[in-house]
Amino acid sequence: MTAVLEVTNLRKAFGGIVAVDGVSFEVRAGEILGIIGPNGSGKSTLFNCVLGQLQPSAGEVRIDDKLTTGMRPCDLNRLGVSRTFQLLQVFPQLSVRDNLILAGQEHQGSMASRLFGRADAGLGDAAGQMIEFFRLSHLADEQAGSLSYGQQKLLDAAMAFMAGPRLVLLDEPAGGVNLTMLGHLRERLRAYHAERSATFVVIEHQMEFVMALCTRVLVLAEGRLIAEGTPQDIRRNPIVIEAYLGH
Amino acid sequence: MMRLGGIAVAIASAAAIAAPFFLKPYGIFLISTWAVLTIAAIGLNLTLGYAGQISLAQGAFVGIGAYTVALLTPAGVPFFVAFMAAGLLSFAIGWVLGYPALRVQHHYLAFVTLAFSTLVFLVLRNEEWLTNGIYGIAGTSRPTLLGWQTGAARDFYFLCLGVLALLSLATWWMLRSPWGRAFVALRENPVRALSLGLDTRRYTLMAFAIGSSLGGLSGALYAPLVQFIEPSSFTLGLSFNLLLMVIVGGSGNFFGPFVGALIAVLLPEWLRVTQGYYLIVYAAAVMVMMAFCPAGVLGLIERAGGMLRAPRKAAGAFTDGAAT
């Protein structure tokens, strides 16, 4: 299996605090990799370093064997890497449909062609399909800000998929979502994964969600990787239990 | 709602065309000022209302455009060439002014643009060899377009109205294209926009450059309208006035600048009976408005329309780009 994402010795320090301390791992094509760890273990910082929101202090990031360390988020996104954020990140005053079109429009043509081309950038149908896929049809023309939290979370994920990325990094997709919606989200993520053979990396606190969705799990504590394995192994691993329950 | 909006636009357009036939020269001068300043306000609405980049320099761009035309036309440059030059020059300077916006936001950016505004004023006042300093430049002539002399007040008003119509259409086209969506995304959540592939740097610079060029084009009409320009016409006061037009009309609302400029141009005239109290009344009205309806006059109308239509759940989000 080839590696879609390869992280080598990644380190990020904020002043004296080392948030990510020499982390190396790879993400294989087609897998759903979970990254878990206690609060403050460096999971989100790791994502931010991989996707250009932050500049790593040291180390390398490769996507499809191409060195991408320090590239701008928008350029990485156009390479086919997409993400969601821990906190909700939709555009509240755009309609659900426009949120989705926006998420795909920069992947086609040049900036000039987008000015003179069609208003929906030729993405109207694709957005419609995505809306249907995430079962948001009845809300398509509502402002995203008027949706419930769970519905916005679905839209947030849908936006990450809009440009047909090969690799999607999901930062706590289940955070703050009620159980019914959670089951729905998990089922939709799995369906998308099966349909498009996309590769996912998921940061998550909700253990059930990780165990049910992921094929492999990494455990991060205090900026370092302390364990790796299948969900079943991780659940039984004494080091992991120690890290979570404290000293 | 769409149809109602269309009817409102048609009525307003008809009124704008018919108005000069019922007005005295001073009235025509006022509505010409409205048309000219609306262009600048549309530009600021683009930069501030849509793209969320605060600028206190729009008045300076009106000045740059006005001086460009006032200096070029006496040298024999045809008006429409000078007009385009004013737009292009403002575009270029606006692009450069956009760079600080890539680093600082909100009130910090306000101060950067405020400093720029002061800088332009100082150049206009002190570089006498070029701008004639505090004595200003008089007698910018009104153009002739394909044999149509626009020297008379009414003719020149129609020229301004025509330019306003063209530029409004162009702006409307841009805002309904993917660019419009990108500008709103820039205002609402630049971090997420960047992660979705938007080159936020280019869109920010574009928002500044296009907004500024509309300021310059407005100035290019302002010079032949008033036929006497001097540096003190383009101080911070004008920038604040344009900002007020955008916010009072409805920031981030396409028709906001039209309404805002109308209020800003006409209200002083109507309040003339109050003599010295005009500014006090105006300021109080703006404060009340901001407290109760931050989405501006058009926001108020939309809200009233929404309440009439369906007493559904009230959407809490208000449309204020400046506050984001």
Image: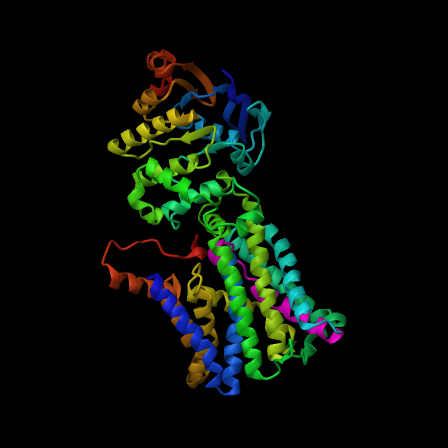
Q: Residue at x 51, y 51 (%)?
A: B179
A33 falls in the magenta region:
no
The quadrant in which the C terminus of chain A is found is top left
Q: Residue at x 63, y 63 (%)?
A: B87
Query: Does residue A216 sit above or below B190 in this rendering?
Result: above
Q: Position of residue B234 (x, y in %)?
A: 60, 70
**How would you classify the magenta stretch by its main secondary structure?**
helix
Q: Nearer the viewer, residue B235 or B179?
A: B179
Q: Position of residue A205 (x, y in %)?
A: 35, 26
> Can residue A186 be spotted in the picture?
yes
Q: Answer left or right for B201 relative to B279.
A: right
Q: Residue at x 43, y 77 (%)?
A: B15
Q: Answer left or right for B37 relative to B314.
A: right
- Dividing the picture into quadrants, the one containing residue A136 is top left
Stretch in magenta: B48-75
> Can residue A16 be spotted in the picture?
no
Q: Residue at x 34, y 47 (%)?
A: A145
Q: Answer left or right for B143 relative to A87.
A: right
Q: Position of residue B88 (x, y in %)?
A: 65, 61
